[in-house]
Image (spheres, rainbow, N blue to C red):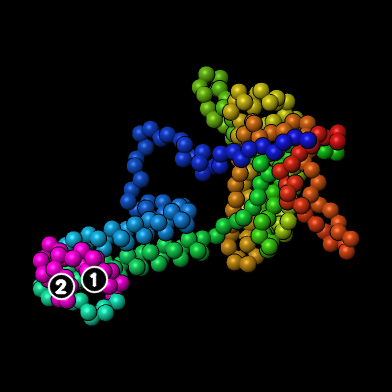
Amino acid sequence: MAPNPPIRMTDRKWLQSVVKVGARRPHVTDLYHFLLERPWRWLLVAILAVYLSVNAAFAGLYLLGGDCLENARPGSFTDAFFFSVQTMATIGYGKMVPRTAYANALVTLEALLGMMSTAMATGMMFAKFARPSARVLFSRVAVVCERDGVRCLMFRMANERGNQLIEASLRLVLTRNETTREAEPVRRFYDLELQRSQNPTFALSWTAIHPLTPASALHGMTPEALVTQSVSIIASLVGIDETSGQTVHARHTYVADDLRWGMRFKDILSTLPDGRRQVDYTLFHDTQDQET
């Protein structure tokens, strides 16, 4: 039995590891997309850090105005900070109030900033909640073995949600380094034809099969050639989430080290005594010798 392979670098981390020389720096308008791509914990920590920093900055400005807050202890950063919190959140308890034109000007500016920041934070969190996503599990490896007498490249996918992906469509692309007749190095892309590229109701698992016929870009290639040419196989899945009605997508990349030659996937489907079908996801990534 082949051991489970370690979890490899994801597509996102691979893209982040690319060094772009001479490219323009992201514009400030890209901040929205940047925040959308961050994990929830990162976004919440960022909002908290900005919130505390802005209130601390306004607290310092209130202190610069001297005794400008009624019922606040003179020189108390704590009182000034919590007055800033009440002002930004438009709470207005009425215990501490501005007593000078300087303080009122700061309150006006902070109240406006508070309304704008609340709207921005609300919009950002709603956009992340409403962002369509597909929870599709790809097998960590792909196998090359015989299927119906034909050598095939195969990998597995599973829908981790309890609903279905309607009209799911799968595309498989191979990319590798080549050299033109003029000795120019290029990176070329080839579509890999699948036995079945459409699935009307993707609910449980789906095994993608690409026959290594003479028409395939993988035909006759060896594991060593895959490494030499830096071959990557990109699987792209698009479908409609039946619950939300939104189009969702998922993607995974296999490299030469992810291919298991002469192996096949372990069976994950079985029938229970009561007639129900059982899917064992604990074996989803496991492989075994084809002859077994």
**Mark earlier in primary sequence (1, 2):** 2
Q: Which mark is residue 9?
A: none
Q: Position of residue 128 (x, y in %)?
A: 48, 61
Q: Quadrant of the C terminus?
A: top right
Circle count: 2
Q: Is residue 237 left or right of residue 29?
A: right
Q: Position of residue 125 (x, y in %)?
A: 44, 63
Give the labeled residue for mark 1.
83
Real-space Cα separation, disc 1 to disc 2, in angstroms:
9 Å
Nearest to the observer: residue 115 or residue 186: 115
- Residue found at x 57% / y 27%: 177
Q: Position of residue 241 (x, y in %)?
A: 63, 62
Figure check: 255 above or below 203: above
- Residue found at x 57% / y 25%: 178
Residue 186 in the magenta stretch? The answer is: no
Find residue 32 and report its image quarter: bottom left
SS at badge 1: helix
Q: Are marks 1 and 2 in contact (CB under 8 Å)?
A: yes
Q: Which residues are magenta?
A: 62-90
Figure check: 161 above or below 281: below
Figure check: 282 above or below 185: below
Residue 78 in the magenta stretch? The answer is: yes
> In the rendered structure, which amino acid carries the disc numbered 2?
Leu
- Residue found at x 69% / y 52%: 158
Figure check: 101 above or below 264: below
Q: Is residue 97 left or right of residue 89?
A: left
Give the labeled residue for mark 2.
69
> In the rendered structure, which amino acid carries the disc numbered 1?
Phe
